[in-house]
Amino acid sequence: LAAALPLLDWVGFDVKAPFAEYAPIVGRDGGPAARAALARLLASGVPHQIRCTVPPQLDETALDRLRAELAALGVTHLVWQTYRLTALSTEHSA
């Protein structure tokens, strides 16, 4: 990421969940790496959009935690995207 950022004009960065809650959402503990990548992006000055496609597993309390975590990192605008269940995401169809 550090090598790529100077070459980029813009970055869309999708945050999946509060960083401590990544594993249940993405299937692995990627929260620390996602947090570090986001911090690096924010420090780089590259224009960006931070967004979250809200999965059904996240309740309003989790979304509040996510908002607070992102604000603490310096995110001033977050785009919420609607989660759409697809045939490929059958693990969420229960």
Image (tube, grey):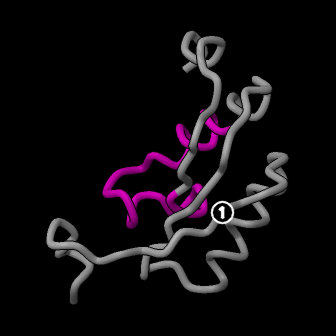
Is residue 55 left or right of 81 when viewed as pictured? left
| Position of residue 58 measured from the top left corner of the image (x, y, whole percent) | 51, 78
User: Under tag 1, what secondary structure?
Assistant: strand
Verify whether residue 28 appears in magenta: yes
Residue range highlighted in magenta: 16-38
In the rendered image, which quarter is residue 40 located in?
top right
Query: What residue is shown at x 64% (from left), y 24% (from top)?
Result: 9
What residue is drawn where x is 80% and y is 46%? 73
**Main secondary structure of the magenta stretch:** helix
Please state which amino acid type lies under the numbered disc 1: Val
In this rendering, the answer to whether 59 lies above or below 90 is: below
Between residue 23 and residue 37, name the one nearer to us: 37
The answer to if 33 sits in the magenta stretch is yes
Does residue 43 sit above or below 76 in this rendering? above
Question: Where, by quadrant of the figure, is residue 44 drawn?
Answer: top right
Task: Please provide percent x and percent y for residue 48.
Answer: 68, 39
Task: State left or right for residue 73 relative to residue 26.
Answer: right
The count of marks equals 1
- Looking at the rendering, which quadrant does residue 77 occupy? bottom right
**Residue at horizontal 84 percent and vertical 47 percent from the top:** 74
**Viewed as shown, does residue 9 lie left or right of 70?**
left
Task: Determine whether, in the image, residue 1 is placed left or right of residue 27.
Answer: right
Residue in front for this viewpoint, 21 or 73: 73
Give the quadrant of the C terminus: bottom left
Give the camera-side residue of 3 and 80. Answer: 80
Residue at screen point 71% across, 70% down: 65
Q: Is residue 44 above or below residue 30?
A: above
Q: Name the residue that disc number 1 marks.
A: 79
Mark 1 crowd level (few <14, some 14–19, many ≥20, 10 Å Cα):
few
Residue 61 % position (x, y): 66, 83
